[in-house]
Image (cartoon, grey):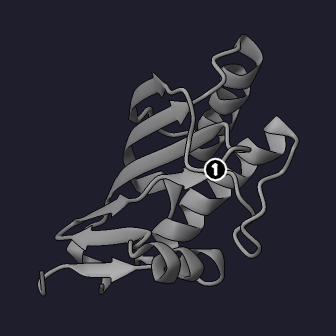
Amino acid sequence: MSHLQYFAYPDHGVRLQEAMHYSQAVRVGDRIECAGQCGWDAKTGKVPEDPEREIANAFKNVDINLKSAGGKGWSQVYKVRLYVTDLSDEFIGTFLKYLREAVPDHKPILTGVKVASLSGPDMRLEVEVSAHVPETNGV
């Protein structure tokens, strides 16, 4: 589809693009649609053992992904899809803490789904977002 622009952020994003034949984000007019971002380290791809660090990494990866596609980051996110293997109050509470910090000025729509597993055995969450990016951003 030649009218669409596809993006993969450096390091682990590019590795996934080459190994798995998918992009991290696509620009569709005034929107950026992001592939699910897990809590891996954006450079190494390693998933931390600490659940809070994993959640923090997922939020950073969403931000990196949006910016690599010409967006400004979390401030433009209007839709969040969350896939988790852990529905404990502590895990979801930590996710919500980071969501409030990432988008303090609005409340995006959110769909959350508990899944049996994700693409990696160590992964506990995957965050997929949609962002509105006015065409005037020059991308």
In percent of width and height, residue 115 lies at 50, 27
Identify residue type, mark 1.
Gly
With respect to residue 116, does 50 lie above or below? below
Which one is in front, 88 or 69? 88
With respect to residue 4, does 35 lie above or below? above
In percent of width and height, residue 100 lies at 61, 34
10 Å crowding of disc 1: few (<14), some (14-19), many (20+): few
**Residue 51 seen anywhere in this rendered image of the structure:** yes
Mark 1 = which residue?
120
Which one is in front, 138 or 127? 127
- What residue is rendered at 47% in x and 52% in y? 36
Query: Can you name the residue that lies furthest to the right here?
Result: 50
In percent of width and height, residue 122 lies at 74, 44
Q: Image quadrant of residue 2?
A: bottom left
In the image: residue 12, left or right of residue 107:
right
Q: Image quadrant of residue 28?
A: bottom left
- What residue is rendered at 61% in x and 28% in y? 85
- What residue is rendered at 42% in x and 40% in y? 80
In the image: residue 133, left or right of residue 65:
left
With respect to residue 101, does 65 lie above or below? below
For the N terminus, the image quarter is: bottom left
In percent of width and height, residue 40 lies at 71, 58
With respect to residue 4, does 106 lie above or below? above
Element at label 1: loop
For the C terminus, the image quarter is: bottom left
